[in-house]
Image (cartoon, rainbow, N blue to C red):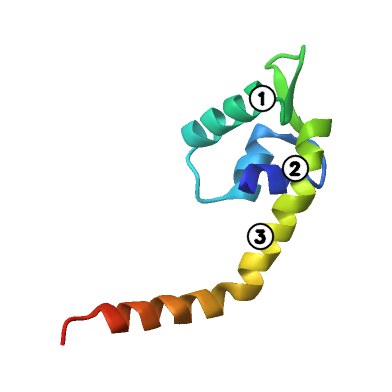
Amino acid sequence: MLVIAALITGPHRFSALHQKVGGISQKMLSQNLKSLVRHGLVDRRVEPTVPPQVTYSLTGLGEGLAEPLCAMMIWFGNNTDAMIEAQERHDAAAKPS
């Protein structure tokens, strides 16, 4: 989700994407990008430079996913407090007396 959201603003090189996503190892980001490329959501473009420059961007399919995904992330952001309160009520009710 975070990689798709980060690419909404346009193409990013790996290092910029790593900084933007944050909290993820380079290995995990690389694995996620490979999976997103495989599923047709992200395009991987390699420039024939030394060293090669790799740029990632959303495909049309990825752009189609980005809008509802962002709406869902906004929903979670707007409802986080209510969900935490619900969890606390649930946990309090589940405690043995």
Label 2 sits on residue: 65
* Label 3: how many Cα within 10 Å (few below 14, some 14–19, many 20+): some
Provide residue 88's location: percent of width, then percent of height.
Answer: 38, 80
Sequence-first tag of 1 and 3: 1
Please identify, in this view, whether the residue under mark 2 or under mark 1 is nearer the observer: 2
Q: Report x, y in % for residue 21.
A: 61, 48
Distance (Cα) linking label 2 and label 1: 14 Å
Residue sitting nearer the eye, 11 or 73: 73
Q: Decide: marks 3, 2 in contact (CB < 8 A)?
A: no
Left or right: 34, with 23 as reference point: right
Vertical relation: 97 (above or below) 24: below
Disc 2 marks which amino acid?
A: Leu
Q: Where in the figure is residue 76, as x and y percent of width and height? A: 61, 66
Q: Secondary structure at mark 2?
A: helix
Percent of width and height locating residue 83? 51, 74
Indicate which disc, 3 or 2, sits on the residue closer to the N terminus: 2
Quarter of the image with the C terminus in it: bottom left
Say whether disc 2 or disc 1 marks the residue closer to the N-terminus: 1
Of the residues shown, which amino acid type is indicated by label 1? Answer: Val
Residue ID for mark 3 = 73
* Residue that appears at 70% across and 65% down: 74
Q: Which mark is residue 37?
A: 1
